[in-house]
Image (cartoon, rainbow, N blue to C red):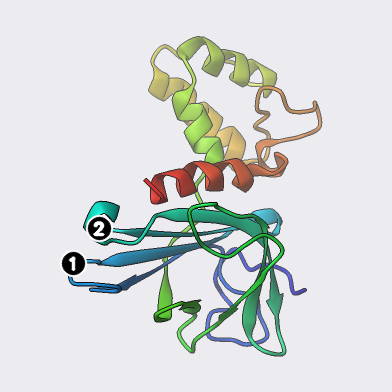
Amino acid sequence: MAEEDATGAGDGDGSAAPRLGTYVGRKRDYSCPGDHATWEISLLEGSFSTIACKSELSLSKGGLQAWTVEGTWEWDEDDEEVLVTITKDDPLGGPKREREVKLPRGEEGSLTFRAPMGDVECAWDRPPPDLVAEQLDAMPLKELKATAILSGLDPDGCIERGDFLRILSRARANGKLVMPGAKPATTAAAVAEPQTAAAKAGSGSAAA
């Protein structure tokens, strides 16, 4: 398996893995008039992946049943396609557990999902979520101060949330930010499995 390309520099280059992030594809009137369906494919760090589908039309009116599945992904350089092995299926629909889903890559870096009623081209839409920034934003002032001290920073002079976030942001950029609960030698840049939890949270909203 090729190394994942977080920067997206390999888009359009068959020798490089696809860009990390979420790919989105849409089909209007997919199964009936008004059934405007959306597919989202997320390729995240640690080879974690989710595939989700939802419709603008309610199920009672004939729209698709929303579903989300999880899996692990790898890049097939020879065939220029992403291979997703499903590890957690959804009883409401989608590929089943242990199935291998092939996602051919197009010339512009898109991924094609082969849906039952026709192929869906999914274009890159957004980067992976920044879990460290989200975690810092959610911290109360007391925890921000504790994180600053844990990171070896001097919080004297920091009064507002913005003050703490600024010094923590600089520490992160310098590789010195230590998040609560991390091992002493572990900085925010190496927090284990950062994308899995985000994908699960994001896929829940995609299936809503």
Residue 77 in picture, x, y percent from top left: 71, 84
Q: Which residue is mark 1?
A: 34
State whether residue 12 is above or below residue 70: below
Identify the image quadrant of residue 137. Answer: top left
Residue 199 in picture, x, y percent from top left: 54, 48
At a point 18% along the width and 67% down the height, the residue shown is 34
State whether residue 176 is above or below residue 190: above
Seen from the viewer's position, the closer of residues 122 and 37 is: 37
Residue 4 in picture, x, y percent from top left: 67, 67
- Secondary structure under badge 1? loop
Identify the image quadrant of residue 148. Answer: top right
The reply to whether discs 2 and 1 touch (Cβ–Cβ < 8 Å) is yes
At a point 63% along the width and 86% down the height, the residue shown is 80
* Number of numbered discs on residues: 2
Check disc 2 and give the amino acid type: Glu
Check disc 1 and give the amino acid type: Gly
Quadrant into which the N terminus falls: bottom right
Q: Which residue is mark 2?
A: 56
Q: In the rendered structure, which disc, 2 or 1, sits on the residue that comes first in sequence?
A: 1
Other residues around mark 1 within 10 Å, as few (<14) / some (14–19) / many (≥20) = some
- Secondary structure under badge 2? loop
State whether residue 145 is above or below residue 1: above
